[in-house]
Image: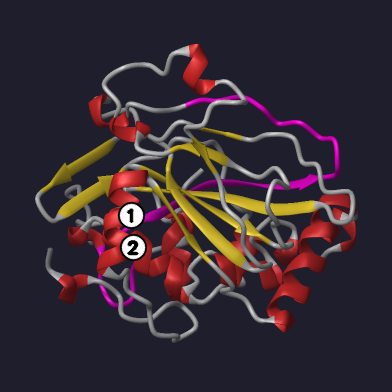
Amino acid sequence: MNETLLPSTNADGLPVVPMSAAQKYQFDIKGWICLPGLLSEVQLGSVRAHQMKFLYEREALPLEQRDNHGGPSQILLDHPAVVGVLNAVLSHQALAAEDCYGFRYDHTYTSHRKSGHDNWGPHGGGGYFNFAGNSHLYQMLPGRVHAGLTRVVWELNEVGPGDGVTMFLSGSHKAAFPPPEELSGRDSPLWESYTCPAGSAVVFTEALCHTGTKWVNPERDRLSLFTCYDTVNSKWGKGCPAPEVIAAMPPKRRTLFRGVWHGMTEVPNINKYYEEANRAV
C-alpha cells in the first residue's frame, strides 16, 4: 500500500490518526474495533443538540443543518481517527490525494432509543465469499484488507455493561457456514459487544453478522449515529445530503459526496473532485 497517496489531515486540518498494528489485527480477526472517547465535552454537547433538533424539530434548523451530518455534526464524517481506519481498510489509493479521500459517504441514520426498545435482528456474515457488486464483502491479501461497506457507529451517550448496544458475531465476516440457530440466538455465548464513554466510535465491516438488541438502561437513552462508507465507484444506500448541506462543508469533506464512478474519458478523467454536477444522488 502506498501511504503517500493518503490524506494526512482531515478537512479541518487535523492530523489523521493512523490505525495501529494492534487495531488492524483486531479489525481483521474480529471484524470490528472500538475507538473510545474521541469527542470533547464541547463537541459532544453541540452534536447531541443538533441530532435531537434534527430528529424532532427539523424545520427549525437552517437548510444547511437539516441533515444527520449538517451543522456541528459534520465533524463526525471525517474525524481524524475515523479517517485513519478508513484509509487502512477501505480507501482506493488511485482515488485518494491530500485534498481528496479515497472512500465515500454511503448513507446514515440517527437512532434514539429509550429503555425497553428492542432492535433484535441478526444479519450479515460470510462476506469473504461475496461477489463484487455486493458491497457487503471482505477481501484480504497478506498485510492488506478491504472492507467494502464499513459502518461507523457514534455513541453520543455513555454505554455501560449490559445496556443493550450493537452486538457482533466476531469473525463471522469470514465464516464459511451460516450460523446455526443455537449459536446465533440472544443467549449465544458467541455474541460480543462493548462499553464506552460518550463520544466514542465503533467501526465494523458490514460483512460481519451483527444485530441490535433491547436497550435496558432507564437512566439514559441510547443516542447513536450510524454512518456507512463505501468505495468511490460503489453505492449501497439511497440518497445524499442536500446541496445546501454539502456546500457548507470544507472542500475536502465535500469529496465524500462526489459521484459514484471511477474513471472515464471526460476531463478530469478520474473521480478526485466534487462539484454540483458531480454529486451522488
The crowd level at tag 1 (other Cα within 10 Å; few <14, some 14-19, many 20+) is some
Is 18 rendered above or below residue 54?
Answer: below
**Would you say residue 242 sits in the magenta stretch?**
no
The secondary element bearing badge 2 is classed as helix
Taking the view exactly as shown, the residue that stands out farthest to the top is 181
Left or right of 176? Residue 118 is right
Left or right of 99? Residue 219 is right
Taking the view exactly as shown, the residue that stands out farthest to the front is 189
**Which amino acid type corresponds to the residue marked 1 in the rendered image?**
Gln
Q: Do the CB atoms of the residues marked 2 and 1 lie less than 8 Å apart?
A: yes
Where does label 1 land, which residue? 26
The secondary element bearing badge 1 is classed as helix
In front of the other: 235 or 211? 211
Where does label 2 land, which residue? 23
Q: Residue at x 55, y 46 (%)?
A: 193
Q: Residue at x 31, y 17 (%)?
A: 177
Mark carried by residue 148? none
The crowd level at tag 2 (other Cα within 10 Å; few <14, some 14-19, many 20+) is some
**Which amino acid type corresponds to the residue marked 2 in the rendered image?**
Gln
Left or right of 86? Residue 245 is right
Residue 107: give x, y in percent of width and height: 54, 45
**Would you say residue 107 sits in the magenta stretch?**
yes
Magenta span covers which residues? Answer: 96-123
Is 240 rendered above or below residue 185?
Answer: below
Residue 241: give x, y in percent of width and height: 61, 53
